[in-house]
Amino acid sequence: MAAHLSYGRVNLNILREAARKELREFLDKCAGSKAIVWDEYLTGPFGLIAQYSLLKEHEVEKMFTLKSGRLPAADVKNIIFFVRPRLELMDIIAENVFSEDKMHSPRDFHILFVPRRSMLCEQRLKEQGVLASFINIDEYILDLIPYDGDLLSMEYESAFRECYLENDQTSLYHTAKGLMTLQALYGTIPQIYGKGDCARHVANMMLRMKREFAGSQNQILPVFDTLLLLDRNVDLLTPLATQLTYEGLIDEIYGITNGYVKLPPEKFAQKKQGEASKDLPTEPKKLQLNSAEELYAEIRDKNFNAVGAALSKKAKIISAAFEERHNAKTVGEIKQFVAQLPHMQAARSSLANHTSIAELIKEITTSEAFFDNLTVEQEFMTGVETDKVNTYIEDSIAQKDPLIKILRLVCMQSVCNNGLKQKVFDYYRREILQTYGYEHILTLNNLEKAGLLKLQSSSRNNYPTIRKTLKLWMEDANEQNPNDISYVYSGYAPLSIRLTQVLARPGWRSIEEVLKMLPGPHFEERQQLPAGLHKKRQQGENRTTLVFFLGGVSYAEIAALRFLSQMEDSGMEYIIATTKLLNGTTWIKSLMDRPEAQTS
């Protein structure tokens, strides 16, 4: 089922299996038939660990979404609540339990907190008078979830907000715990590098946890050579830019959630000849996107301008394979063709899907609005007129374009100019509040606090120096046959990935000056390995680095890291881990304060 997790350099299926084992053990604690009541946010991440079939094997007969009022009828002995530790969810659980008690049905209640138990939540259940109804109260530590053969995510949506707005380091503790779990399965990581305050905190916690478990030495030969911890606020620019890889654009336009995307159905309707198209499907088409699908693995990280050629090449190969049937003369040849048929049909349907998605994306990327927006982004990145009010942003506000689009551009201008001049800052602030409503003053304050939108404090703007030293802008980036990571944004090389690339060769000592200009400390730690576990490297064997983005990572950055892994002379393979997979829109949304959302 999850074969694609074991294709890569590091077999991530081991992590998935460990998570499944814990889940089975918990379900077996509750003997008899079961119904699970899900906190809706958890269903996606859990789907990547265990399908319904696994739950069914352990007597799970019904599944419901957690909502207030009465639970739907279910003839089961156990009711298990799978929830995040949030107070508002405890009130709903209390309501559910009371309504069951009134029915006098003899049920056993259990609660599983993901990813940790919470004293506050248990206290709330006690105040509501239902704590005693629960037979098992447990926690299920779902820290790092394998998304693909080289990708792990905690899907911790509020990590960036908590760290930079609320000064809450819970997500960093979970990151450190997740990394300890990883080391327990894949061996101690000998070298740790990091940049940023959060990275420093995580490394300190890991080293402390290691000292606390000093008695139990890990006897596994290390799989990873290096761990690189990077704070998202070291590179605030990259997620704000529009991603230009195939996967990045799918995420920008439609949003990828837990490895699935929902697309407009009309493009995927199977129209038969002569039939009227009145019965078009209304349900969005839901597709799973991961490297288990051969074609997707091939095109996901390409710049979108190179996708058309790749699809047409694939179409020729597939139709040539189908033509082979005319050449099959003997029984053996026919048998061979028939054996390949399911694979060929799957390839054909995969091609049809991706051709449809590419057409949908092309409609947007060839529009004038997309081009104008991209032009302004690229001007900011290259340092063109970043210190005055931008006429395109002005016009977009006047036309009442979506607020998120405006915020992404204004933040981008601020980051590329090391803050905005007072006059420019005040002008944007006034225009945004007058056009979109004064309730957004809270959002603007949040963006300011997070460092995305700020006043220029010193006259010196370090961004041009950083851009030149790290070669963040490459003229004439080759989109078809890339030779540099800048292809993922058609010219802009993500700062976060440049730092990763320089660390591998020639090392961070060569860019000390630039590192000092970026926020937070940079550091290096070594972890002692038990005797006999030092890796003897074969000639030509690549080193493996785990890059952990604290606060989120975009699909274009992941594509850039995969590109580095595939470069013949890099000598390095990268596995990517993050607190959350994000794009500019979801990132800005997580920092927004909407009064209507607060009352609901």
Image (tube, rainbow, N blue to C red):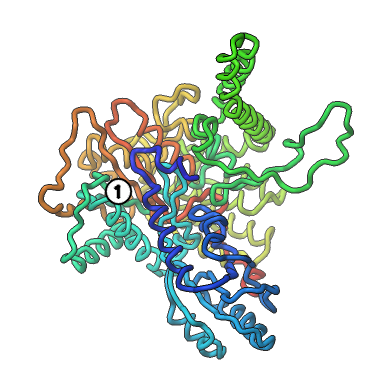
Quarter of the figure with residue 107:
bottom right
In the picture, measured across the screen, residue 31 lies left or right of residue 356, that is: left
Disc 1 residue type (three-letter) = Leu
Q: What percent of the width, then of the height, locates residue 290?
A: 52, 41
Dot 1: what SS? strand
Characterize the local packing of mark 1: few (<14), some (14-19) or many (20 or more) Cα atoms within 10 angstroms: many
Residue with the mark numbered 1? 228
Is residue 233 shown to the viewer in this render? Answer: no
| Front-lying residue, 332 or 176 | 332
Q: What percent of the width, then of the height, locates residue 282?
A: 78, 47
In the picture, measured across the screen, residue 568 lies left or right of residue 300, that is: left
Whether 154 is drawn above or below 405: the answer is below
Q: Residue at x 52, y 77 (%)?
A: 110
Q: Residue at x 49, y 37 (%)?
A: 291
Q: Residue at x 36, y 48 (%)?
A: 460
Q: What percent of the width, then of the height, locates residue 324?
A: 61, 13
| Front-lying residue, 126 or 512 | 126
- Give the quadrant of the C terminus: bottom right
In the picture, measured across the screen, residue 382 lies left or right of residue 346, that is: left
In the picture, measured across the screen, residue 417 lies left or right of residue 184, that is: right
| Front-lying residue, 249 or 458 | 249
Quarter of the figure with residue 502:
top left
Is residue 404 shown to the viewer in this render? Answer: yes
Whether 119 is drawn above or below 556: the answer is below
